[in-house]
Amino acid sequence: MRRHHTRLRSASKEVVIGHDRPFCIIGERINPTGRRIFQEQLREGDMSAIERDVAAQVAGGADVLDVNMGVPLTDEAELLSKAVTMIQSLTDLPICIDSSVVEALDAGLAAYQGRALVNSVTAEDDRLAAILPLVKKYDAAIIALPNDHDEIPMESGKRLELVRKIVRVATEEYGIAIEDIVIDPLAMPIGADTTVGNTFFETVSGIRDEFGLNMTCGASNTSFGLPGRHALGAAFLPMAMTAGLTSAIMDARTPQIVEAVKAADLILDHDEWSGNWIAAHRAKQAAAAAVT
Amino acid sequence: MRRHHTRLRSASKEVVIGHDRPFCIIGERINPTGRRIFQEQLREGDMSAIERDVAAQVAGGADVLDVNMGVPLTDEAELLSKAVTMIQSLTDLPICIDSSVVEALDAGLAAYQGRALVNSVTAEDDRLAAILPLVKKYDAAIIALPNDHDEIPMESGKRLELVRKIVRVATEEYGIAIEDIVIDPLAMPIGADTTVGNTFFETVSGIRDEFGLNMTCGASNTSFGLPGRHALGAAFLPMAMTAGLTSAIMDARTPQIVEAVKAADLILDHDEWSGNWIAAHRAKQAAAAAVT
């Protein structure tokens, strides 16, 4: 099975997601969900928190930044468009444009310079019909979730069926290149149901082996409600990478989790001459020496 | 494919290794290799370091203790026999009796109370003929390495061939139960050759899928010569567990590595009701509160 490369670009920088590449870290932070103060600020037109979030995630090692502006009772399209322009003035990292509102995705894509990743579409016919033409129009890549009618299938076989549908519809009906489809295999909270981890890994290796597609997921979901979330994230991502996950929307500001991803890159032979690992270790030593 | 349970016992405690069980942590510390002072002490008949090593590994979370007494210019059989008796007076954890000298294995097994794990045999005919009768005689379990004539095969296919040979010879010629064979799929230093990690994972899932056998490995080998060894160990073991590794001879004294294994147990649904994870978190909080 051929394994695909998904190419994302800002105005000046390309990021390639692939099974033979270092893991693509998509910073999850620019998202008002569950952040009351940030929501309040956005409602008042204060976008200064974004500046700090961009800086922290770039420093932490993000390769791409997810941007979600889903604040109730605001014009999400306008906010997302403004946020995209602002973030592109702050960093050259490509952006993952994240909304459930089609008009907001359209506005965000219109404002974006480069080749974006769109987050997301499901396997539902009306969502595919609404979002895939935008993906095609703006020459973007798309994150697709194998769920249907707001129901998340709990068996990997059913998820794979929906992936087959998504791939067929996107490539045959909307002319989207297969390498521009990034599947989100649906990482769920393990604290609520301890079987979801194994289902996730089965789904990931199934998608890798059948389609060679790239995959991403909301990694922080898995540890929701459990203690020791950083340690759980630091174990989960290397495990998912071993199964075939090539990217995650994740906490790029926690060194333990980012370091675990970099270690897994080295172990999976995605870090040529161990260069990234050794350079990161030297930088850490230099930083420690500068403090003392 | 049925997945096997390997049962080890001390005089009073049973440990079960299995694909549906929490990972079995075999403490690697009671081994004079590379420990000059410890070697010197053992030569002079001073075994006091063992007491500290047992206590530290039990506190760290070891389930089994590996015991190696390979000190040049000593009577290894006598040392190993003494060490086994001493350790069994200190802890109820089962022991993995580790030697390349057949007479030492025999003496260690004779001194041992319970059902030991023997470390190790290779696929070479003369080694199989020398060690398997001891395993049978003492009703022990055996760690077997899929290498031949001192050459380590660099492809997983060749390693699987040697596993087939070991299983056939051990069960058909020596009457050893298949569940008492624990394969060491050969974890090698990634710093020297970055492809060995993928070969290892392929070998592990191949052995799981074809035989359902339990597996262990010398986990610290993988990070040899690289910086950031604890972080590498903490990523490597959850990855190997995802592929199907059920045990490791490892550093049980480093909380980051043991915590990563416990996190992976939870994620793989080997920690019922997340009980071990939550209990460990509470103990950590209690310890932190006691300090302040």
Image: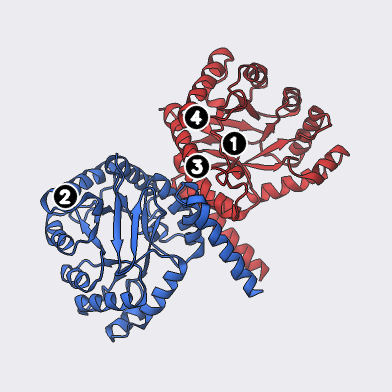
Chain colours: A blue, B red
Instruction: Decide if residue A168 is on the left or right side of residue B67.
Output: left
Instruction: Decide if residue A220 is on the left or right side of residue B280.
Output: left
Residue found at the far front of this picture: A12
Q: Which residue is mark 3?
A: B197
Mark 2 surroundings within 10 Å by alpha-carbon count, few (fewer than 14), some (14 through 19), many (20 or more): some
- SS for callout 4: loop
Structural distance between the alpha carbons of marks 3 and 4: 20 Å
Please report, as a chain letter, where disc 2 is located.
A
Q: Which residue is mark 4?
A: B213
- SS for callout 3: helix
Foreground tag (1 vs 3): 3
Structural distance between the alpha carbons of marks 3 and 2: 35 Å
Residue B185 percent location from the top left of the image: 53, 33
Mark on residue A171? 2
Residue B69 percent location from the top left of the image: 76, 35
Position of A39 relative to A28 (above/below): below
Structural distance between the alpha carbons of marks 4 and 1: 16 Å
